[in-house]
């Protein structure tokens, strides 16, 4: 079996590290580095435990893309910083300085990063997974939105969901996703996205359809096969599968339902740019700079652990 292509939902993972590890982890100058160390440790563990042969740390070029906001102004609106004049995201003060350090470490280590101007990391992941023709793909994330990328063909795509930590990781392919949400296995990924449109997600500013929760949404998608088929049935006077309550709720949400699918689904045509080849290097790209960064920022055993994982990979 060939080594997988691993796609990291970077922001999701370094946010998780930030909240999971104590801010007493600091550099000699007092700068917190808990997110840096946790993120680097995650990469080392992915390389070791998953046998990653290729890896891309996927980045947000735009965490709240204009095309999504135009369609649905509420999209992530609650996360915009109160005093921001540029629509920037509300990020903890002690996390913000750590992001450039993470990028410097990745660069010195030779770990590939990928982004697409005007798009989120979700879109980078969706596009890279969609276009992969050679290797199995594993997406490491703490965000359920990424469940939509799972598939069997032409190459299998699974999600490693670390929402409850790495030790409780859930590995979800089409069968597992279908079982978890009572969705059809043959199109579990796209069915999940359709269900998510109906269900909504307050954390992303997606109101969903009033009166239709997760179970009802899954039942509708399973029964009709897709969101498009559900919406077609709404306007079909001969259809008897939709209850009056569901039909009325869907009619009332017509404007939302016209916009939400594009907002929820990853942009498979996102113009992803990778900064280098995505093969996991066996030695750091710039060992001296990596040593300097380790010392300057007090990264302890995290960077040596990453280098060791790179050197020992199969």
Image: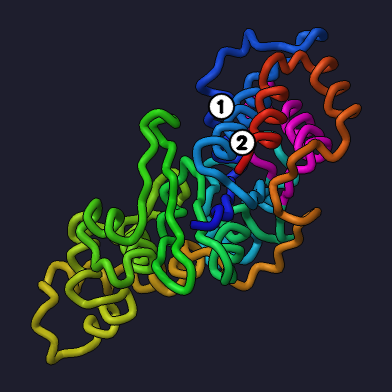
In contact (CB < 8 Å): disc 2 and disc 1 = no
Please give the range of residues in magenta: 88-113
Foreground residue among 153 and 126: 153
* Residue drawn at (44%, 31%) of the image: 166
Work out whether mark 2 precedes mark 1 in sequence or the reverse, and give the earlier one: 1
Tell me how far mark 2 sits from mark 1, CA to CA: 12 Å
Disc 2: CA contacts within 10 A as few (<14), some (14-19) or many (>=20): many
Residue 56 in the image: above or below residue 33: below
Confirm whether residue 33 shows in the render: yes
Foreground residue among 174 and 305: 305
Residue 29 in the image: above or below residue 173: above
Q: Position of residue 58 (x, y in %)?
A: 65, 50
Horizontal side of 36 relative to 197 (left or right) equals right
Q: Position of residue 54 (x, y in %)?
A: 64, 52
Q: Position of residue 63 (x, y in %)?
A: 64, 50
Secondary structure at badge 1 equals helix
Secondary structure at badge 2 equals helix
Magenta stretch encompasses residue 124: no
Disc 1: CA contacts within 10 A as few (<14), some (14-19) or many (>=20): many
Rendered-image quadrant of the C terminus: top right
Q: Nearer the viewer, mark 2 or mark 1?
A: 2
Question: Which disc is residue 43 wearing?
Answer: 2
* Residue drawn at (62%, 13%) of the image: 23
* Residue drawn at (62%, 66%) of the image: 67
Residue beneath label 1, please? 17
Residue 92, picture quadrant: top right
Q: Position of residue 156 (x, y in %)?
A: 44, 64
């Amino acid at each position: 079996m060939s080594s997988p292509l691993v796609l990291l939902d970077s922001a999701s993972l370094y946010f998780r590290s930030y909240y999971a590890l104590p801010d007493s982890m600091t550099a000699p100058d007092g700068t917190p580095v808990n997110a840096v160390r946790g993120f680097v440790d995650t990469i080392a563990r992915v390389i070791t435990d998953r046998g990653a042969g290729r890896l891309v740390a996927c980045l947000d070029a735009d965490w709240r893309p204009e095309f999504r906001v135009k369609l649905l102004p509420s999209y992530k609106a609650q996360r915009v910083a109160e005093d921001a004049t540029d629509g920037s995201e509300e990020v903890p003060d002690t996390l913000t300085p750590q992001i450039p350090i993470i990028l410097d470490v990745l660069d010195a280590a030779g770990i590939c990063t990928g982004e697409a101007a005007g798009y989120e990391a979700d879109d980078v992941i969706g596009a890279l997974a969609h276009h992969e023709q050679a290797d199995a793909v594993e997406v490491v994330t703490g965000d359920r939105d990424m469940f939509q990328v799972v598939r069997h063909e032409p190459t299998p795509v699974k999600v490693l969901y670390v929402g409850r930590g790495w030790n409780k990781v859930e590995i979800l392919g089409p069968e597992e996703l279908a079982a978890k949400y009572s969705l059809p296995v043959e199109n579990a990924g796209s069915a999940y996205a359709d269900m998510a449109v109906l269900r909504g997600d307050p954390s992303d500013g997606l109101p969903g359809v009033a009166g239709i929760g997760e179970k009802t949404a899954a039942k509708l998608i399973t029964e009709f096969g897709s969101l498009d088929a559900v919406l077609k049935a709404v306007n079909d006077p001969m259809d008897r599968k939709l209850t009056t309550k569901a039909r009325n709720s869907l009619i009332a949400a017509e404007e939302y339902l016209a916009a939400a699918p594009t907002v929820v689904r990853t942009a498979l045509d996102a113009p992803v740019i990778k900064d280098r080849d995505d093969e996991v290097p066996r030695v750091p790209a710039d060992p001296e700079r990596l040593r300097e960064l380790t010392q300057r920022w007090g990264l302890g055993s995290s960077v040596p652990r990453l280098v060791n994982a790179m050197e020992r990979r199969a």
